[in-house]
Amino acid sequence: MLSNLTKPMKYLRQFSAFAIVTSVCLAASSLMAAEAKTYQVTGPVIEITATTITVDKNGEKHQIARDKSTKGPSNIKIGDKVTVYYRMMATEVEVKTAPKNN
């Protein structure tokens, strides 16, 4: 009689392990889907401060915010050719209502 009970328990353990692995995979994929797209700009540095780096790309100035968590060398200077990788992030969202038709 005991052997008849061990078979369903074995399947229950296998199903539980499968459910846990599936849950972890789904959670990881949903976190990855939430990532914002990464962009890049390459060109000479035309201005650099503690909080920004400005790069000239074909005559267009790209000023990008940076902070202490930004990776890269600390000795960047004006004229250095760099590639800056960045993500766009909203700082505020304002809802505009559509005009009412009379």
Image: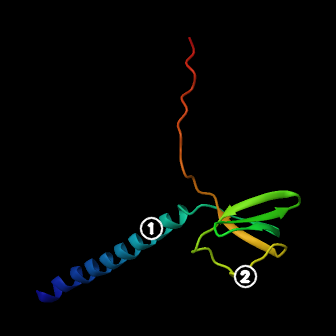
Mark 1 or 2 closer to N-term? Answer: 1
What residue is at 53 percent from the left and 61 percent from the top? 34
Circle 2: is it few (<14), some (14-19), or many (20+) Cα within 10 Å? few
Instruction: List x then y, in percent, for residue 35.
Output: 56, 63
Q: Nearer the viewer, residue 18 or 46?
A: 46
Instruction: List x then y, in percent, for residue 56.
Output: 83, 63
Q: Amino acid at mark 2?
A: Asn
Which residue appears farthest toward the right when viewing the image?
A: 58
Q: Nearer the viewer, residue 77 or 97?
A: 77
Q: Secondary structure at mark 2?
A: loop
The quadrant the N terminus occupies is: bottom left
What residue is at 57 percent from the left and 15 percent from the top? 101
Q: Nearer the viewer, residue 49 or 7?
A: 49
The quadrant the C terminus occupies is: top right
Whole-angstrom CA distance, mark 1 to mark 2, is 42 Å
Q: Mark 1, mark 2: which one is toward the viewer?
A: 2
Answer with the quarter of the image where residue 36 lies.
bottom right
Q: Is residue 21 above or below residue 32?
A: below
Which residue appears farthest toward the front when viewing the image?
A: 49
The disc label shown at residue 26, or none: 1
Q: Amino acid at mark 1?
A: Leu
* Residue ID for mark 2: 75
Q: Secondary structure at mark 1?
A: helix
